[in-house]
């Protein structure tokens, strides 16, 4: 598997001035050196470095399923694509 991004990255924002909320959330699928597929999540308050989490999956299908669940979850919670 070549070392390239496997799918387009999603970038979400959720801004609600009445609740002092300004958040971002980014998702991407990336290959690892050992043939696995990683789902990279990066989130936090806009203007900060935020936090990151990486989950490894043995197959592309498993990673894409988790990726799709995360995208759907962000949309349900009011995030919009930036």
Image (cartoon, rainbow, N blue to C red):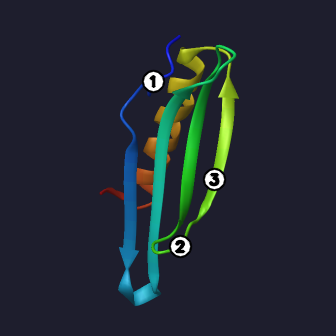
Callout 3–callout 1 Cβ contact below 8 Å: no
Q: CA distance from mark 2 to mark 3?
A: 12 Å
Q: Position of residue 43 (x, y in %)?
A: 54, 59
Determine the residue positioned at 65% across, 20% down: 33
Q: Position of residue 11 (x, y in %)?
A: 38, 51
Q: Which mark is residue 30?
A: none
Q: Quick check: can you spot residue 79?
A: no
Q: CA distance from mark 1 to mark 2?
A: 27 Å
Front residue of 80 and 4: 4
Image-quadrant location for residue 54: top right
Residue under pointer 2: 48
Q: CA distance from mark 3 to mark 1?
A: 19 Å
The image shows residue 53, relative to residue 45, as above or below, that is above
Residue under pointer 1: 4
Mark 1 or mark 2, earlier in chain = 1
Determine the residue positioned at 46% across, 86% down: 20
The image shows residue 45, relative to residue 61, as above or below, that is below
Q: How many marks?
A: 3
Q: Nearer the viewer, mark 1 or mark 2?
A: 1
Residue under pointer 3: 52
């Amino acid at each position: 598997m070549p070392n390239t991004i496997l799918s387009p990255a999603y970038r979400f924002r959720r801004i609600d001035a009445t609740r002092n909320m300004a958040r971002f959330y980014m998702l991407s699928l990336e290959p690892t050196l050992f043939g696995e597929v990683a789902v990279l999540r990066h989130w936090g308050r806009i203007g900060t470095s935020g936090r990151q989490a990486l989950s490894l999956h043995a197959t592309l299908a498993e990673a894409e399923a988790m990726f799709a669940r995360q995208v759907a979850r962000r949309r349900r919670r009011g995030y919009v694509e930036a």
